[in-house]
Amino acid sequence: MKKIYMAGVGGMLGEAFYEQFKNEYELLCSDIDDNEDWLVKLDFRNEEKYIKAVTDFNPDFLFHIGAYTDLEYCELHEKDTYDTNTKSVEYAVKIANNLNIPLLYISTAGIFDGEKDVYDESDQPKPLGHYGKSKYLGEVYVQENSKDYIICRAGWMMGAGAKKDKKFIQKLIRQITDGVRMLHIVNDKLGTPTYTHDFANNVKLLIEKEHNYTPEWIKGGDLMYNNDKIEVKTFTSSGPSSFGPKESWKTIYFLDATKFLQNYYICYEVNLQNDDEKWKNIKVNKKQTFHDQCAQKRRPRISFSKILPQLDKSDVKKIYDGNIMDIIQQ
């Protein structure tokens, strides 16, 4: 199972990251405010402790998420803001480079000046306050010094409930539930309210695509059940599955994981053993059968899409078609 160290995840976005990743990755999560039982206390502004904590865990990925986001606080506490939002990012880059692992840095849409209605990655940042400037300096450092990185800019976060969401949407909800009849709202700010779990899930899809992370539980292999060997062939593309020349099984399954980034799977059960004549005579190519290549001590390589037309309908049964999370969450 892949390991991720998440730094600065005591807030509402960090909680969403924990929830989205916890079932498929081994996590170590830290924050200066260890307000959950899955958090360990760490101030990532302490370079020595930050380096030791991550190095001891030896993760496959480092997520640097925490920051001061209160605009008023950042304007009033300039040094603290840059120590937290910029200097600590330098430590994260150093750690990731030393461990030769990718770094995820969460930045902000606040690096723009708001002169446009819509921005994308090609627009030149122009931060106005200390918050935006401190986050943009973090971006620049990551881009210029990190060996392997992903930068994601978050908009207006929402969705953690009253306990952790101190932002605009929750402030409105609090006023309404408190019985306020007249709401006082600024009319000179535009933003993109973003549900924290949607953001975290999309980051998950992004890193799995960029770094080809296939969750361990969908990888193929063999296992024993009631003393009968079961073979599982998992494929995440249209490419062939490989078979050992002496491979044997009582039951074989083919798991179509080509859409694993969307948690969507199809599983087929093939009711043929490795020594059944029908299986042995499957054509691997125009000239050779499965048995021919095994007899030559070769590893037959053939895709399920080429196996399927050579079998009778009674030999193959689709036993699952859908979102695997429906099963996991039951």
Image (cartoon, rainbow, N blue to C red):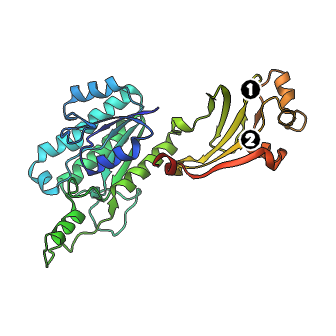
Picture coordinates of residue 138, whole percent (x, y): 28, 44
Q: Secondary structure at mark 1?
A: loop
Q: Is residue 219 left or right of residue 75?
A: right
Q: Nearer the viewer, residue 299 or 77?
A: 299
Confirm or deny contact between disc 1 and disc 2 (CB under 8 A): no
Picture coordinates of residue 27, whole percent (x, y): 36, 35
Residue at figure coordinates x 82%, y 28% from the top left? 275
Q: Is residue 226 left or right of residue 61?
A: right
Q: Nearer the viewer, residue 45 or 134?
A: 45
Task: Check disc 1 and report the residue beneath it.
Answer: 248
Picture coordinates of residue 104, whole percent (x, y): 37, 41
| 172 vs 120: above or below | below
Q: Is residue 103 left or right of residue 304?
A: left
| 252 vs 179: above or below | above
Q: Which mark is residue 321?
A: none
Name which quarter of the figure residue 37 lies in: top left
Q: Which mark is residue 270?
A: 2
Q: Nearer the viewer, residue 217 or 63?
A: 217
Q: Secondary structure at mark 2?
A: strand
Name which quarter of the figure residue 82 lies in: top left
Q: Is residue 267 left or right of residue 193?
A: right
Give, as a three-letter code, the residue at label 1: Ser
Going from N to C along the chain, the mark reached first, 1 or 2, is: 1
Name which quarter of the figure residue 311 lies in: top right
Give, as a three-letter code, the residue at label 2: Val
Picture coordinates of residue 97, whole percent (x, y): 37, 29
